[in-house]
Image (tube, rainbow, N blue to C red):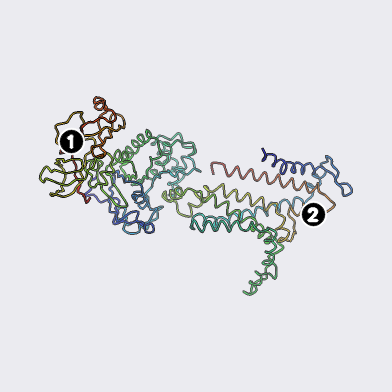
Amino acid sequence: MPIVIWQLVFFVFPLIFLVVMSFWLVINYRMVPGWDTVNWTKMYSKGYFWDTYWRTLAYAMIATITTTILAFPCSFALAFKVSATLRRWALFFLIVPFFTSYLVRIYSWQIFLNDNGIFNRMFDYLGLGPFHLLNNFFGTLVGYLTLCLPLAVVLQLISLANVDRNLIEAAHNLGCGRLKTVFLVIVPMAKIGIILGAVFTFILSFGDFVSPYYLGGSKPPTLSILIIDTTKSGQQWPRAAVVAVTMIITLLTIMFASVSAAYRKKP
Amino acid sequence: MPNTSEARPLVSFEGVTKHYGTVAAVHAMDLDIYAGEFLALMGPSGCGKTTSLRMLAGLEEPTEGEIRLDGKRINEIDSADRDTPMVWQSLALFPFLSVRQNVEFGLKMRKIPSGDRQQRAMEWLERLEIADLAERDISQLSGGQRQRVALARSLVTEPRILLLDEPLSALDANLVVKMQGVLSRLQKELGITFVYVTHSQSEAFAMSDRVVIMSQGRIEQIGSPKTIYRNPTSRFVADFVGSNNIFCGTVSKEGATLQVNTSVGCFSCSPDNDENSFPMGSTLNMVISSDLVQISLTTPEAANQVRCRFISEEFVGSIVTVFAELENGADFKVQVRQRDLADLGLKAGAVFYASWKATDVHLISESA
């Protein structure tokens, strides 16, 4: 019972309030409760809203694909190629980043990525560059990876560590080469962890404000930046709520689709 | 039963040793396996039987020695390229594939076209009487059905040898007997070699042409089930077979009929099929199989007899194993027909006499 109350107070009620607020009006910079669909029609008729929506979706997708591909060799090596001791230490170091504020970690990237930063000094020394690594999508992606990669590795690792070794041997024994076994047996067996890692990455990067703002330079905006901008311009909290509710619906749809794909039996 | 002296072996282990760190799992193993035979590797857990099988499957590499398949060294050949399919104790079926897809897996790896693949998979499913389950998930099958899927998956590529690692150990007792029948019949029909690892004597004896008894990484004895049962060559084998009474003694009279002095009495022994000679004073193990012992309530006339106190009985159908205690406290087992025991009306603590013929004794020298 306490968990139900906790969920109601801290999750369901604020969410209902957010939906209700999207129908309120702003008159003379003040919110007035009401039931008007004007916020929805206004937001949905604007080209920049949809541009931002598809851009954010694309960013999150690219982050998800990049994270999943980069995380897999790492979690695979930790699950199959290293000793149990090394695996425990690696797990520890994968969790350590979460001890530090995400904002602090993102700020520290600026020192590495800016035009006079550590990376460009190194490139300069090699006679290369300068490369613009900050205030563009590359910077945003670095931020997304900082946020999501350790988590994706941990989730994949848990799944991979539980793959029955006999199945891998059985595949070899039936004539399946090593690389083929990875895709035909190990990936299907670890499907749930891989998909969960991807879903978390998508959720975190779709809603992230810090990376596109501090490393991506906030232009062009993502939906999270659009929310901030909307609240700042004329106290349009109800229209910001429209963006927020749209994001939540998008995330819920993608989450349910992926999780049902993860637990579906046949490939 | 193949002619072991002339035919070239299909598989041979030559001085094969496997170390895990400092522990030797298999030690200098020499073994020939012939085409078309049903060979059981048997022994207690940790004896090296599974390691031997895994080396043959290419899942472990020998530390020393050579494994040959058809005369060709296969030590370095990857399991994927060996064509030595194995059936796992856990069966290792792919849970994300249907029954048919599981069976097709090996054919797919050999790049057999889809239509052909499906047809061959279905033929094997029919042969194992599970064709109606082809599109099911593995999780929907019973233990016996999974067993059949695992067999079909390994046999669909028509290998010359099938390796089985305790495949029946997870099944109910009645299903074990049924699957033993399926395996024996399959092996005879296909005429291919089965190498079967088990710790169960009944499984090994019921199905195999030859049994290899292993202990601590070494082969103790190789022979037909009957030879292993009647003529164990070491005390370990005599003990492992489980139904033997073994007494250590010394020879007190030489000749065709020996007199052997043991802690439970002096017995005359004239084993008819032993090449070993036992000189005066040598120590040996006297083995009396519990099914060659007669029991009575009165002192029998036979020369070899012991007085026993009845402790308990274990009923396994028509045959009963009687557990008794000798006067010096040693254990003694007798297997009798249930009816014969009922006629005697023995109760716990009752005294009876066990006797056996001098020719039914089997002798093993102490060093073996």
Image mark 2: chain: A
The kind of secondary structure element at disc 1 is strand
Residue A218 horizontal side relative to residue A96, left or right: right
The disc label shown at residue A229, or none: 2
Where, by quadrant of the figure, is residue B246 drawn? Answer: top left
- Kind of residue sitting beneath label 1: Gln
Have a look at marks 2 and 1 and say if they share a chain. Answer: no
- What amino acid is labelled 2 in the image? Asp
Q: Which residue is mark 1?
A: B305
Mark toward the viewer: 2 or 1 = 1
In this rendering, is residue B296 above or below B51?
above
Q: Say which element carries label 2.
A: helix
Task: Name the residue at 36% across, 34% down.
Answer: B178
A98 displayed left or right of A10: left
Which percent across, then down, holds residue B325? 26, 36
Q: Which residue is found at the position 33% from the left and 41% from the top?
A: B200
Crowding around mark 1 (Cα neighbors within 10 Å: few <14, some 14 to 19, many 20+) is many
Estimate the spatial distance between the alpha carbons at disc 2 and disc 1, rounded to whole Å.
104 Å
Q: What label sits on residue A198 in the rendered view?
A: none
Residue B44 at x, y = what percent?
A: 33, 46
Horizontal and vertical percent for residue B361? 18, 40
Quadrant where the image shows the N terminus of chain B: top left
Count of picture labels: 2
Q: On screen, B329 above or below A122?
A: above
- Assess whether mark 1 and mark 2 are in contact (beta carbons under 8 angstroms): no
Q: Chain of mark 1?
A: B
Q: Residue furthest left?
A: B255
Which one is in front, A12 or B161?
A: A12
Could you say where residue B93 lies in the image, as x and y percent from the top left?
A: 45, 43
Along the viewing direction, whichever of A15 and B73 lies nearer the viewer: A15
